[in-house]
Amino acid sequence: MAKKSMVAREARRLKLVARYAAKRAALRAVLKDPEASFEAKMEAQRKLQELPRDSCPVRVRNRCHLTGRPRGYYRKFGLGRNKLRELAMRGDVPGVTKASW
């Protein structure tokens, strides 16, 4: 089980990413626009740097929804490897069977 503080930190980051997504996208669009002036691009860059650091989606870490484990995460299921194996053996994950060949 991950530390509760780490799980809470990730939850806070997810809220910040959602809150600033539109503003961040608008500023990024100005930076990528070839028609924008140099001054407009510099202003957009400055405003982008003033946004909270944790509002950047790159800083969000995928974690197991049950335990909060950051490593061994399967995106398709949203679970860590340990819990995925546990639930698959119990038959709680539909469409997953034990491999045998």
Image (cartoon, rainbow, N blue to C red):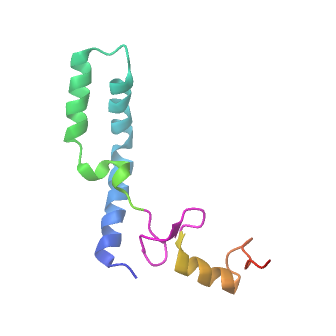
| Total numbered circles | 0
Question: In front: 80, or 12?
Answer: 80
In the rendered image of this protein, does residue 76 appear above or below residue 40? below
Q: Position of residue 8 (x, y in %)?
A: 32, 70
Q: Is residue 55 left or right of residue 1?
A: left
Q: Residue at x 67, y 85 (%)?
A: 89
In the rendered image of this protein, does residue 27 appear above or below residue 75? above
Q: Quadrant of the C terminus?
A: bottom right
Q: Residue at x 21, y 24 (%)?
A: 42
Based on the picture, tell me whether residue 48 belongs to the magenta stretch: no
Q: Position of residue 10 (x, y in %)?
A: 35, 64
In the rendered image of this protein, does residue 66 appear above or below residue 49? below
Q: Is residue 80 left or right of residue 96?
A: left
Looking at the image, the residue that sits furthest to the front is: 101
Q: Residue at x 59, y 77 (%)?
A: 84
Residue bounds of the magenta highlight: 62-78
Question: In front: 20, or 30?
Answer: 30
Looking at the image, the residue that sits furthest to the right is: 101
Q: Residue at x 43, y 74 (%)?
A: 69
Provide the major secondary structure of the magenta segment. Answer: loop
Q: Is residue 75 left or right of residue 29?
A: right
Q: Quadrant of the N terminus?
A: bottom left
